[in-house]
């Protein structure tokens, strides 16, 4: 069963995403991108792929989304491709860098608490996913 916009929005609210209105286009796109067996484990809104957007961690991959009126940028990164997540906190902002083969310059900048929660979610989802294989 595919998730609805309302279900995705509720899940993001439960994860503590502060600025849902700023990522409403990404949420609408996410409903069509998520596969039936994917579950959102973590999320953050902020600077994603060098533009405002949404980063989502599912039980299978990390999705980076930017949606504007005229275009959509999407990057999906399988959890097994991520060897670690580097996190740098400066004042109220945190920057996540995904580390792994072929993942140069994959950074997400968000509110510090959201960035910390996202880093934990990616590490936990990755450990579970790799352990399940």
Image (cartoon, rainbow, N blue to C red):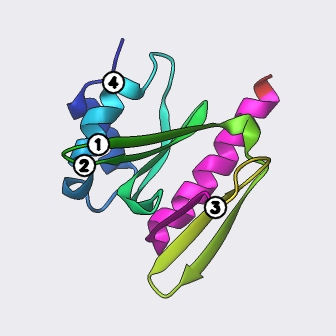
Q: Is residue 120 inside the magenta stretch?
A: yes
Left or right: 108, with 79 as reference point: left
Say which label, 3 or 2, has the lower sequence index.
2
What residue did someone put label 2 on? 68
Mark 2: give few (<14), some (14-19) or many (20+) Cα within 10 Å: few
Instruction: Decide: is 39 above or below 2.
Output: below
Density class for disc 1 (Cα within 10 Å; few <14, some 14-19, many ≥20) is few
Q: Is residue 96 left or right of residue 38?
A: right
Identified at 18% across, 46% down, the residue is 69
Picture layout, residue 90 above or below residue 123 = below
Determine the residue positioned at 64% across, 62% down. Answer: 97
Residue receiving disc 4 = 32
Mark 1 vs mark 3: give the one in front.
Answer: 1
The quarter of the image holding the N terminus is top left
User: SS of the residue at dot 1?
Assistant: loop
Q: Are marks 4 and 2 in contact (CB under 8 Å)?
A: no
Residue 105: image tag: 3
Residue placed most toward the observer, 74 or 122:
74
Mark nearer the N terminus (1 vs 3): 1
**Which dot, 4 or 2, sits closer to the camera?**
2
Does residue 16 show up? no
Quadrant of the snapshot with the C terminus: top right
Name the mark on residue 71: 1
């Amino acid at each position: 069963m595919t998730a609805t916009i309302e279900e995705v929005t509720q899940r993001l609210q439960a994860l503590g995403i502060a600025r849902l209105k700023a990522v409403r286009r990404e949420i609408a796109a996410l409903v069509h991108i998520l596969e039936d067996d994917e579950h959102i484990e973590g999320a953050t809104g902020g600077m994603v792929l060098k533009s405002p957007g949404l980063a989502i961690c599912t039980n299978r991959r990390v999705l980076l989304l930017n949606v504007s009126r005229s275009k959509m940028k999407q990057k999906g990164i399988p959890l097994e491709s991520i060897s670690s997540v580097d996190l740098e906190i400066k004042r109220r902002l945190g920057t996540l860098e995904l580390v792994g083969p072929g993942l140069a310059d994959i950074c997400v900048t968000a509110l510090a608490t959201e960035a910390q929660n996202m880093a934990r979610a990616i590490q936990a989802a990755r450990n579970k996913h790799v352990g399940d294989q």
